[in-house]
Amino acid sequence: MNDTTQAAQAIWARLEALPKPRLTELFAADPGRTGKLAARLELSDGGMLFDWSKTHLDDAHLAAFVELAAAAGFAERRAALFAGDIVNPTEKRAADHTAQRGVGGTDAVHEAEAFHARMHGLVGAIHQGLFGEVRHLIHIGIGGSALGPALAVDALARDGAMVDVHVVSNIDGCALEAAFAACDPATTMVAVASKTFTTIETMTNAQSALSWLGQNGVADPYGKVVALTAAPDKAVEWGVDETRILPFAESVGGRYSLWSSIGFPVALALGWPDFAEMLDGAAAVDRHFLDSEGADNLPLRAAFADQYYTRLRGCQTRACFAYDERLALLPSYLQQLEMESNGKSVTAEGAPVSGPTAPITWGGVGTDAQHAVFQLLHQGTNLVPVDFIAAIAPGDELDPAHHRILLSNCFAQGAALMAGKQSADPARAYPGDRPSATILLDDLTPASFGALIAFHEHRTFANAVLMGINPFDQFGVELGKEIAKQIETGGAKFDASTEALLKAAGLG
């Protein structure tokens, strides 16, 4: 055991020994608690408020977690991330997603600027009609290549898109057929997003999209394709003209790739100025994360709360509820970001971890979720920390009562989870002392959206540092793919259950 590990374990032991008062007791003991645990982050067009006062963090826990971050080498690993050093040791790569926003190593930033200029030119040409009339884009990807664009377009293009974007990720043909039904082949382009340009689900869907174009009167289907990839040579081999290939760096991971050429459908739907504002909002969080220390660093403070509940309270899940219909896809996005990044059981050095790592991330949309899963949150036996996300400005133009009721419910749920309610009837009693945090945007704009996503990226990284793991590889997704290929190829033998299922489905 090295000195760093010993120091971290000693701090964890101190944390575990600290008292665990109820949330109501913490508020009673410290009238200034909200001021200490809430903070604003200012952006170019407003800002966002972060409030952790309804979590069990207190001065003693924060001080110990700050020590833990120092012992874990947080400052050094953060510096390495932004310098473009190798922070993904298993794959010997940097993680250059912040460089896509202009914050990072000089060479990576310059390369990102060049790739953005190329994408800006293609987006402008399409908008100017140089590719004929383009009313629809079918964006084909999977994982981060699909989740990020789908979330951004759904969040920011509801008032009307310059080009109608349909994101398809599932190999289930029903997903692709739904996109076909909504599009006119004569005015449709296809974006194929694949880092390696070999992903079987993506390339199979892409081939079917080409067939659909050809079968519906498009003379040159390949002329309708834009490739978004870190392997441009593979895209050329597949048949895409190099003028319609938008590269991005190999060091940009899929779930961190929205800011790269993978953001092409976002720029096409919103226009380049809005895409640039999204980058700027994310860059504001990058600078805050890089320049702020200790508990003043908001993504790091969020990680302190995450570690408190996962490690000290044994919470196996964390819930996120967006009280904004435009952010309906955010929980799904965060599932991949957090669980693929930090769902590990070994440290960055390959040793077994000393405690639990990523919780299961899940969630939904308020107020729908209140009539479904909130029963468990209020009265169930599982302790589930909750994040509430909302915007002060409404996203609709209906009677203001809609948004007033929405926000009232959001804030009421946090208050109710904390306070609980006693009753002589056990079935009507609420134990309370259930934690929550709130992120309140002034308005959901491209800048605040970018800031929100970047905040969660850095929160994920900070958690990884505190746990001593590598958040930038994802080998856990490979084994199932390998076995699927064996099934497709044929000749392999499996367990009796799998063999029976294959036979029942006509695949054996």
Image (cartoon, rainbow, N blue to C red):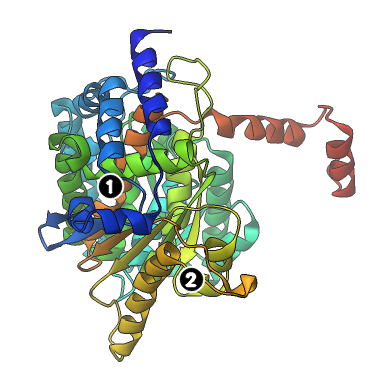
Q: Is residue 194 placed above or below 450 in the rendered structure?
A: above
Name the element at disc 1.
helix
Q: Which residue is mark 2?
A: 421
Q: How many marks?
A: 2
Q: Dividing the picture into quarters, in which one does residue 424 lie? A: bottom right
- Quarter in which the N terminus is drawn: top left
Name the element at disc 2.
loop
| Residue 223 shown left or right of residue 260 in the figure | right
Identify the amino acid type marked 2.
Answer: Lys
Q: Is residue 68 placed above or below 315 in the rendered structure?
A: above
Q: Is residue 193 visible?
A: no
| Residue 270 shown left or right of residue 320 in the figure | left
| Residue 28 shown left or right of residue 144 in the figure | left
The residue at 30%/75% (across/down) is: 160
The earlier-in-sequence mark between 2 and 1 is 2
Q: Is residue 34 placed above or below 259 in the rendered structure?
A: below
- In this view, the residue in front, 100 or 330, is 330
